[in-house]
Image (spheres, rainbow, N blue to C red):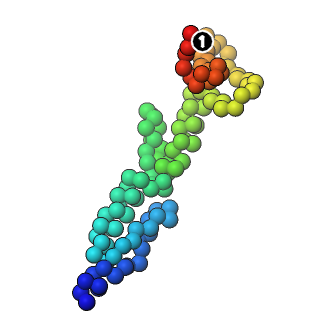
Amino acid sequence: MQCLCIKRPFPPIRCRLGCGELFAGGAHEILKCEEDRLEHEQEMCPRRMVRCHVKGCAATVRAMDRPRHRRLHMLRGGIALHCVPGAYEYKVAMGLRQLKVQLWGGGGASGHLKG
């Protein structure tokens, strides 16, 4: 009887950040599920808050929004990425002395130089 009571399932523990992750198991695993939930919320949850690593930026954003935030830094720094073939116009500031253009994948060799 005691074995059955220990292993009975408990209601699943939900991520408190709202991502929908559930942590469930038997009553004998409730502490482990709680530890897993805490680890998830601190290290893996896409809704956890993280700091921007760009020097001089003190922004705190959700982990799932970090790529978009990084793109903003790239655009502000003058870096433009185009993933679709085509013609693009890029305006440069007056008095600019150097411009660096890098192209990948144009030759069909998957970015490897052959020759």
The one of 115 and 67 positioned closer to us in this rendering = 115
Q: Callout 1: few (<14), some (14-19), or many (20+) C-alpha neighbours within 10 Å?
A: few
Can you tell which quarter of the image residue 93 is in? top right
Residue furthest to the bottom in view is 1
Q: Could you tell whether 67 is left or right of 108 in the image?
A: left
Residue furthest to the left in view is 2
Percent across and percent down for residue 3 are 25, 83
Say which amino acid is labelled 1: Gln
Percent across and percent down for residue 115 are 56, 10
Q: Is residue 81 above or below residue 36?
A: above
The image shows a total of numbered marks equal to: 1
Question: Which residue appears at 45% of the width and 35% of the height?
Answer: 54
Question: Which residue appears at 31% of the width and 73% of the height?
Answer: 30
Percent across and percent down for residue 61 are 49, 48
Q: Is residue 95 above or below residue 87?
A: above
Per the image, the residue denoted by label 1 is 98
Q: Is residue 11 visible?
A: yes
Q: Is residue 93 above or below residue 41?
A: above
The one of 5 and 54 positioned closer to us in this rendering = 5
Q: Secondary structure at mark 1?
A: loop
Q: Is residue 16 visible?
A: no
Question: Which residue appears at 25% of the width and 89% of the height?
Answer: 1
Question: Which residue appears at 70% of the width and 22% of the height?
Answer: 91
Q: Could you tell whether 50 is left or right of 81 in the image?
A: left
Q: Could you tell whether 24 is left or right of 93 in the image?
A: left
Q: Could you tell whether 21 is left or right of 25 in the image?
A: right
